[in-house]
Image (cartoon, rainbow, N blue to C red):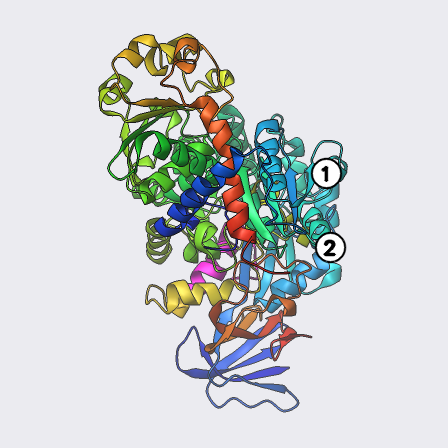
Amino acid sequence: MKRHLISAADLTRDDALLILDTADELARVSERSIKKLPTLRGRTVVNLFYEDSTRTRISFEAAAKRLSADVINFSAKGSSVSKGESLKDTALTLQAMGADAVVIRHGASGAPHRLATWVDGSVVNAGDGTHEHPTQALLDAFTMRSRLGALDGRRITIVGDVLHSRVARSNVLLLHTLGAEVTLVAPPTLLPVTVQSWPCEVSYDLDAVLPKADAVMMLRVQKERMNDAYFPSAREYSRRYGLDRDRLARMSEDAIVMHPGPMNRGMEIAAEVADSPRSTIVEQVANGVTIRMAVLYLLLGGETQ
Amino acid sequence: MILIKNARVLGGDPVDLLVRDGVIAEVGTGLTAAGSTAIDAAGLIALPGLVDLHTHLREPGREDAETVESGTRSAALGGFTAVHAMANTSPVADTAGVVEQVWRLGQEAGHCDVRPVGAVTIGLAGERLAELGAMADSAAGVRVFSDDGKCVSDAVLMRRALEYVKAFDGVIAQHAQEPRLTEDAQMNEGSVSGRLGLTGWPAVAEEAIIARDCLLAAHVGSRLHVCHVSTAGSVEILRWAKSKGWNNITAEVTPHHLLLTDDLVETSPLGSYNPIYKVNPPLRTRDDVLALRDALADGTIDCVATDHAPHPVEDKEAEWAAAAMGMIGLETALSVVQEAMVDTGLLDWAGVADRMSARPARIGRLTGHGRPLAAGSAANITLYDPAPRTAVDPHGFASKSRNTPYEGMSLPGRVVATLLRGRPTVMEGKLV
């Protein structure tokens, strides 16, 4: 495995399977009454969050703590960042503090790539702009594998704002690596103009794709996008691309419904669908901790101080 | 008196050039002149001093990035004897006072002639015309007007500007960028931007403005110059416009758009998302680069202009979206043109002289530059050795800034000497 996890493309098929298998083992730890492992004792993991994302941050924090790492949370709000400190100076500070891994969430695509040029520790991308969110893709794959079995040949449909989605980019890359067949569904305005070059199928018609899907992943769609004319109204979006009860009924019986959260209930996903037994949304959150443990373990565990 | 011995004028057979009182006095073989300083130019190409239509000298306002002094030293080292200083300074060069200040600073520096470009609109705001006539009548004698960095996107304002400058033979140099199509745009819109999640900068945003401006310029019979053309589609539009006989339309291309492509943002050995490649207009695709080369070769694009855009280190050592746009280019321009145009067989040295000296001088209405290397011409001369191939080392640059995309890249050629009206500004590759 590479030293950093910045893009899902950094992972070979063997790397990805190793992370998923490691997560399987670590999941058993989470079932014990004492959840902690001593693996990363004495190692320092910094959560460097330039965007508010409580769910992702606490997921990484829980993962690091269960592996006994020291965790430092560095939040853009109320830190030196608000005084205008550059990413590079922050990186040099973390470097001086001896961070073994830096988990970064940043609003600018590519910020983790830049960070990796300034620090010696491992960089884990926890979401950069509209680029990637590889641990989300890993936890999604983990969730799918536990429900559906091996992903080779499985048909996964990802629906929504692909253009602005880091979740979609990472999922397309990782699922392709794992042998799944991905179909993206979105209004044409919310797809990159060059999406044909991606390793997946593309459709504008959700109803045509749904019956064949083994898993349907709904992406969060910001209502404000209608102000930029990406679609006429939230209602029209919902009618054409939302997953409601009727559409759920037309899906295959074993197919699952996923969402990376946070959801817009009533927009891209109906409440009854989100809360149905077919939904894996809560499982995805639990699996997030496990998969991030596996990533930190594999990136840091092999080294000795 | 300077006697240049055995120079290959425009790449031709070796001849001698005798320079006296700032003028080329004699061209021939076996010349001698008692009391003259001899320059051995054996193996060197002699070109008329290069003229840049598009240089950011940053003074006044951003003297941390560049000054007229440092920028013109950089220009001389690159073989330039005249540069056009862009108007997006602070304060903006939108009054006679500011353009005269820049012009005077250029005179004092003395490394090359500095022709200030005047802003088209007050503060580059795209709302009201600046006092173009006052700038034209000033000591700076402005003939090129541009809101470069911003597009004069209002069609009526553009029409009026084109018409107005006819009174003093001015030209509007348009930065063609439709603003709505490029809000928050970060790099060329294509497969790379799609993968990297960077907001796309579509080719159509440039092409639509160029098409509109060509039609406007033809309608009112004015001079239009299109800055830094970057797409194959723009080339097609310009080719069409010129085929209509609209000879008042000219265009430039930068060295970097002749050589570099947008995939460097993803796969450069200097790292992914390295803002050293962030530039406006953005680096495009291989197909665009090849179309631009062909257009420069066949004259559809009239000239090379550097768009030398210095930035301090901290403005580039940042995440992509936060980094400044622009690259320096004066000291690498001729080498890049050799690499992209001469060594590929698309252009000979006479062609280089035309595209980097004669035509830009003509567009800028700059007398005394871009003249043939013949008896009677002002002795603005660049001596260039096309033979050596070296890795670009920005630490030796005279520019205050280091934001070159060519660091470590192997490029051909070296400027050996530059003469400004007979006075050496560069000798042995070093500033005099």
Q: Chain of mark 2?
A: A
Q: Chain of mark 1?
A: A
| Along the viewing direction, whichever of A50 and B320 lies nearer the viewer | A50
* Left-right relation of B12 to B254: left
Q: Mark 2 falls on what kind of element? A: helix
Kind of residue indicated by mark 2:
Ala
Q: Which mark is residue A81?
A: 1
> Residue at 34% across / 29% down in the picture?
A147
Q: Which residues are magenta?
A: B352-372
When asked about the image quadrant of residue B71, the answer is bottom right
Residue assigned mark 2 = A96
Work out how far the residue at label 2 is from the one at label 1, CA to CA, in angstroms.
17 Å
Quarter of the figure with the N terminus of chain A: bottom left
Question: Is residue B232 visible to the viewer in this orientation of the structure?
Answer: yes
**Residues tagged by mark 2 and mark 1 found on one chain of the structure:** yes
When asked about the image quadrant of residue A143, the answer is top left
